[in-house]
Amino acid sequence: MSFTESAWEDTRRRRARWDEMARLRSVKGTNYYHRRLVEVYRHLIPRGKRVLELGCGRGDLLAALEPSFGVGVDFSFEMVYQAKKLHPQLYFVQADAHHLPVSGQFDYVILSDLVKDLWDVQGVLKELHGVVVSHTRLILNFLNSLWNGPLWFAKIPGLAHDGPPPNRFSPRDLVGLLNLADFELLKKWGEILIPFYLPVFTSLFNRYLIKCFPFSLFALSHFFVVRPLTQKGKDIKPSVSVIIPARNEAGNIPGIMERIPEMGEKMEVIFVEGHSTDGTYEAIEREISAYPARKVRLLKQQGEGKKDAIKLGFAYTQGDILIILDADLTVAPEDLSRFYEVLSTGKGEFACGVRFVYPREKGAMRFLNLLGNKFFSYAFTFLSGQPITDTLCGTKALLRADYGRMGEVLPPSCDKLDPFGDFSLLLGATRLNLKICEIPVRYRERNYGETNIKRFRDGLLLLRMVFFALRYVKFF
């Protein structure tokens, strides 16, 4: 990236300002605002990850994340000098983000209160493509321009700009810059209404009210979670595991085996039979014999419930992409190829079926089920920051690597609260900030057997799960 004389002069003035702030120790980590930023970033980034921070200052935020490998970059000589003394377990580089001298791949890249200080935001974002991969998440926060006047008047150290004027752009402007630099916005929200500590009020406003309209309009800091747009080669065909929980579905097994499409370089089908009384286990054994060329595995469930069956099936998978198909054939097996296409091309990282776009067959979904599903969809849209139209469609797909990472961010209590596994997977996708894609499917009436859902009992469990998720994901 080439710099003009005016760009170098602007950089020199900003570097001198931050060098002076470092000497005065009026820097990040000295007030409530930055302590709250640490809480937010620790919620977003699990411990033990590879983390790169641009504009790291003294490295306090980077150190608080406890990375397995942490690199901080800052153009201030004084800041980097102090960072190396304070956090010797981390690596710090004195350099300009416009000419990034860092190589390697990182799980997370942080730009905290940096973009308004950059000469060329788009140029810096393009520099990052040398250190990101498809699963990398870029997390940015920057000050809301509505607060420029109050912050200058209050003279809050590290927040009020007393040096060269900052960039003045809105969240929409930054979304445009991200698109130009081949990054995709996953979610955005605001944090902090009161930038100092007041007993009771600070927690009420900064943890709860800030997440609700119209208070969110006045957030001090805008937060963005972004992913790089990396194109996967058309000749790359990831392997697939299709997991099919089956309880009292003997009449549907032949149709599943006949209609399920071949996908990927390799495909395996894993049936998990759960205490059936209609000969489902034997029906699966017969179909396995009828299709000797297919790799099919049959597992006998020891526990109870669909979630337990899915968990058992996932434990035996070998495919890169995991797809769940309910054995009731209310969603056509032929549709699985669409789920595979979304994940194999990188268009999405978690795929959900949606049963509300196309007309449903008469009797496919009861009215109370429809109302409940709509409620839970609105709740999870609020939770995740991404639109979720159908939380309880049983057909879902995700990468096996991401399923493994969900164990790092989900508490054990999820197993007790979620009877089907749908909410736990959505909650895991939300915590990992995966790109969620919705795939419309036609929902058909069941032709064999009866539903295994206990509507009111399971509905109450799901409601408990929603309240748990609100506290765990949203109001942290």
Image: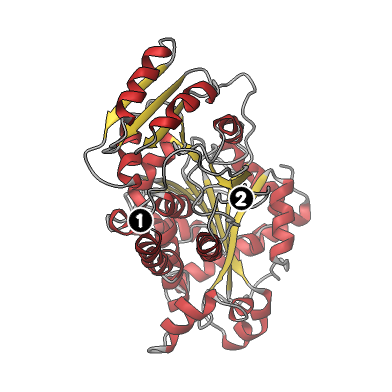
Assign the N terminus to one quadrant of the image.
Answer: top right
State the residue at coordinates (43%, 63%): 473
The amino acid on which the numbered mark 2 sits, given as a three-letter code, is Lys
**Residue nearest the viewer, comparing 386 with 72:** 386
Q: Please identify the quarter of the rendering in which residue 315 is found.
A: top left
Q: What kind of colouring is applied to the model shown?
A: secondary structure
Q: Which residue is mark 2?
A: 362
Identify which amino acid the numbered label 1 is placed on: Asp
Q: Quick one: which residue is furthest to the left in this view?
A: 302
Under tag 2, what secondary structure? loop
Precedes in sequence: disc 2 or disc 1: 2
Q: Residues within 10 Å of mark 2 (few under 14, many from 20)?
A: few
Q: Quadrant of the C terminus?
A: bottom left
Please name the residue shown 40% across and 19% down the image.
Answer: 287
Give the x, y percent position of residue 76. 53, 58
Asked if residue 48 can be seen in this view, the reply is no
Up the image or down, 258 lies above or below 451; here it is: above
The quadrant holding residue 347 is top right
Q: Position of residue 82 (x, y in %)?
A: 40, 60
Residue 418, which numbered label? 1
Relative to 333, 297 lies left or right: left
For mark 1, give the secondary structure. loop
Residue 471: horizontal and vertical position, in percent? 39, 69
